[in-house]
Amino acid sequence: LKTEALQLVEQAEDAKALQDVKVQYLGKKGPITEVLRGMGKLSAEERPVIGQLANEVRESIQGAIEEKQARFEKEALEKQLSEETIDVTMPGRPEPAGGPHLLTKIIEDMEDLFIGMGFNVAEGPEVEQDYYNFEALNLPKGHPARDMQDSFYITEELLLRTHTSSVQARTMENSEGKGPVKIICPGVVYRRDTDDATHSHQFTQAEGLYVDKHVRMSDLKGVLNEFAKHMFGDERDIRLRPSFFPFTEPSVEMDISCKVCGGEGCSVCKGTGWIEILGAGMVHPNVLEMAGYDSKEYTGFAFGIGVERIAMLKYGIEDIRHFYTNDVRFLNQFHKA
Ligand code: FA5
């Protein structure tokens, strides 16, 4: 019986087969239980001999079963461990990551540059009072130069700001006639312009303003030169043209040589080789006085940069609408820019 049982244990190929052997030999209906149960019928001499024998057989079968069981468990564990091994040296699966928009990057880059030149970053509301957008900038109601910036009015007194110059009016007013003021102010502006390759009804400007005693046109030129060199490198040409803004006197516009240029058919410079990126000038005495400055004591310069146009020239982007349609094939090109 013992040999037979041990042989079956030996042959058992899995835990289930082993359990069957256990039930068959050691179970309640198994031969050993039967022998032990029948002990009462044996004589006093036979009982210890048979009892001991039966126990011995049971223990050795039990021992063999337990040993085999332990082996099965160990094998199962080893199998599981080897299957679940993690190779920490394997390269990971990269998750697609977003990144800042190209315009955000240009703005941050500009902020860094101007902060380095002593400017502070300022902000103002996009829904603006007519007063700060026009009147405080020497553009009274009915002034023909208001037509230069066709506006989205909300009420008679409120509009979507047409330029970031509204922030210079606010900042100067806040400093109550006591200089200096040195700010850079990036933000979104709105105009009723017809959309084309270089114009959008919503675009981004960055305003600069420096008011102090003895600020001169040459200071403006120096700062703009620094800006152009930083943005475009030495290989691009800049030019200043005389211009007109009601809030500056004298006024200029700055052009950069076109990089997108395909000559006559160029969508960005229309074959001229130049694109206008900013307006600037010396703050008009009327504007200083309206904000509470003594224009005999204080002077200042201001400029308003078109941020999209900077990006277009820097990266050779041929249409301003790419910035807003959010095609990821366009946006992804500038993740590492
Ligand atoms: C102004 O907005 C003045 N406030 C700039 C200024 C500030 C002058 C301080 C003097 C002192 P202008 O309308 O030219 O100026 O616009 C400035 C720049 O914004 C332009 O050079 C151009 O780069 C950009 N820009 C103007 N209109 C659009 C448009 N519709 N879409 C995209 N960019 C535009």
Image: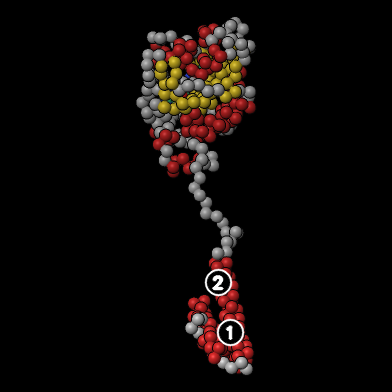
Q: Residue 332 carries which label?
A: none
Give the residue displayed 44% in from the left and 42% down from the top.
328
In this figure, which residue is indicated by the disc labeled 1? 58
Q: Label 2: how many residues lie within 10 Å, few (<14), some (14-19) or many (20+)?
A: few
Residue 310 image position (x, y, % from top left): 50, 30
Give the residue displayed 42% in from the left and 34% down from the top.
324
Q: Quadrant of the N terminus?
A: bottom right
Q: In which quarter of the image is the C terminus?
A: top right
Residue 99 image position (x, y, % from top left): 51, 40
Give the residue displayed 63% in from the left and 24% down from the top.
117
Residue 272 visible from this viewpoint = no
Decide which of 330, 158 is in the foreground and name it.
Answer: 158
> For the residue marked with disc 2, what is the amino acid?
Ala
- Give the CA distance from mark 1 to mark 2: 27 Å
Q: Does the closest atom of ligand 1 sit within 8 Å of the Cβ of label 2? A: no
> For the residue marked with disc 1, what is the amino acid?
Arg
Nearer-N-terminus badge (1/2): 1
Task: Tell us which disc is closer to us: 1 or 2.
Answer: 1
Decide which of 217, 171 is in the foreground and name it.
Answer: 171
Q: Which mark is residue 76?
A: 2
Q: How many marks do you count on the picture?
A: 2
Circle 2 sits in a helix, a strand or a loop, which is it? helix
Residue 39 image position (x, y, % from top left): 56, 88
Circle 1 sits in a helix, a strand or a loop, which is it? helix
